[in-house]
Image (spheres, rainbow, N blue to C red):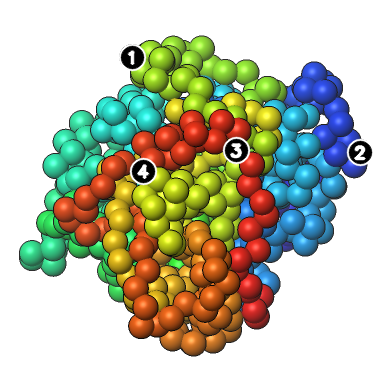
Amino acid sequence: MISRRDFLQVGMAASAMVGASGFGNWARLAAQQSLTQDQLLGFDTFGNVSLIHVTDIHGQLMPIYFREPEINLGVGAARGQMPHVTGADFRRAYGIEDGSPSAYAMTYNDFSALAKGYGKVGGLDRVSTVINAIRADRPDALLLDGGDTWHGSYTCFQTEGQDMVNVMNALKPDAMTFHWEFTLGSDRVNELVESLPYAALGQNIFDAEWDEPAELFKPYKFFERGGVKVAVIGQAFPYMPIANPRWMFPEYSFGIRDENMQAMVDEVRSMGAECVVVLSHNGFDVDKKMAGRVTGIDVILSGHTHDALPEPVQVEQTFIVASGSNGKFVSRVDLDVRDGRMMGLKHKLIPIFSDVIAPDPVITKVIEDQRAPYADQLSEVIGRTDTLLYRRGNFNGSWDDLICDALISEREADIAMSPGVRWGPSILPGQEITREDIWNVTSMSYGKAYRTEMTGEFIHTILEDVGDNLFNEDPYYQQGGDMVRIGGMGYRIDITKPQGERISDMTLLKTGEPIDPAKTYVVAGWASVNEGTEGPQIWDVVENHIRKQGTVQLDPNNSVQVVGA
């Protein structure tokens, strides 16, 4: 199909622009002078069809900081394979120079220092500028949104997703698929979907009662682009009722349904599709497995696991594209489709450096209109941090360490649990923490902070269950996010063991005593999938804690010992 060197990658392009020096010592002005919008958007137009992919925006309208994961472990066949490579190993794999724009955008090392030089990333008005530039070059490019869009911020919560719908409508996508959107509740999702001027796709969204495809969500849509008949098939997050509260969308069922996916691919091919694109929210490893089981897919645009890869990964004859999260990247994929088949492609993962890419004033105005009613609440300063606050990686991140500390303190608990979700921007040392910052890592429609009692045995069972969701060697059984974050307790995990044998050496940190399976402990947490959960909202718990702290200072968390990585 196409060789590795034919791919256009930001890792090599951006490194060549600025060289290998810096390590964050440049002023922001110097960073702007060294890296231009034209360089970021430069692309040798290829073929006759262009795809633009954004995914996992999670309500982030504005520029943010976002640190990529330090730990992203693969198991089984995925061990040591992309995207389960981080840091220096990732840079070596793609020829990315230390201290370069690509190093800052795509790896975690020296993040705070590099952030001071290169500035924030994202902002949907900057994303719009990139989209407009691609459309100027290829006017009929398809813009495809991979979902997790109507969720994850203060304004998204307050407007029940309307802020994101309004901004995305202004960007004019051609189709989208879904995950966290369903946690708005099916009535609200139905209302918003019915209003969309573009396709809402999900071949695996079924009516739960009749086990038939849901009428509101079409499995696919055809587009005529560059003289080519392109079919886009939607794949919503398969494990909605497991990872999120089933009671919020009881009339819908999901699942991978790869047999139905094969049927849909065969159907669109029989209807004349010359190119088949799957707009997926499976997660990268699930997409890889599906690509090996379903024939006839040309490109999978992958979402859910927030991976950002400067090259597609090829499985059989299918190319899988990963475009990051939080509005930090846009992928452009150009395809050469001739005689009913894809002959080749070129790809560029475009990092949205907010100080380099000029905002689109039309979208800036739309964003300002969404935020204006909440400006005072968003901007109120709650405290500041001397610690880098981030949330990405298989185990505890510092944002969740802070949330766990707040739960233990405010809810008078022995142990705290925070869900292993991947969304949420980072905060640099020395920054103020605003209410918006807190909501960016806590906003959800079932955010009440519970306080309950659990036996040591039950805590062990929870850890084993979540660990299996993450480290089962079969990607189709990886049904959640990252590992549940734990405060007040340490443990050892052997990721090579089977379920029931991974977790050991559980210790109550405040006493240093082993967790007794028969003893009861007070546990506080949030984001329970159980209906009727009682307690204060997690954002209020965290805000109260930060106000009391004034300045957040967190010690390095070494409470989880990982074996077999």
**Distance between the Cα atoms at labels 3 and 4?**
17 Å
Q: Nearer the viewer, mark 1 or mark 3?
A: 3
Callout 1 secondary element: helix
Check disc 4 and report its element: helix, strand or loop.
helix
Disc ID at residue 21: 2
Q: Which of marks 2 and 3 is nearer the N terminus?
A: 2
Q: Which amino acid does label 4 sit on?
A: Ile
Q: What element carries label 2?
A: loop
Residue bearing the label numbered 4: 538
Considering depth in this image, is 209 or 463 the residue closer to the camera? 463
- Residue 20 visible, this orientation: yes
Residue 315 at least partly seen: no
Who's the residue at 52% across and 78% down the image? 514
Q: Which residue is drawn at 68% across and 72% down?
A: 80
Q: In which quarter of the image is residue 203?
A: bottom left
Instruction: Check disc 1 and give the amino acid type.
Output: Pro
Q: Mark 1 points at which residue?
A: 373
Q: Are marks 1 and 2 in contact (CB under 8 Å)?
A: no
Q: What is the quadrant of residue 92 in the picture?
A: bottom right
Q: Give the Cα distance between marks 1 and 4.
A: 23 Å
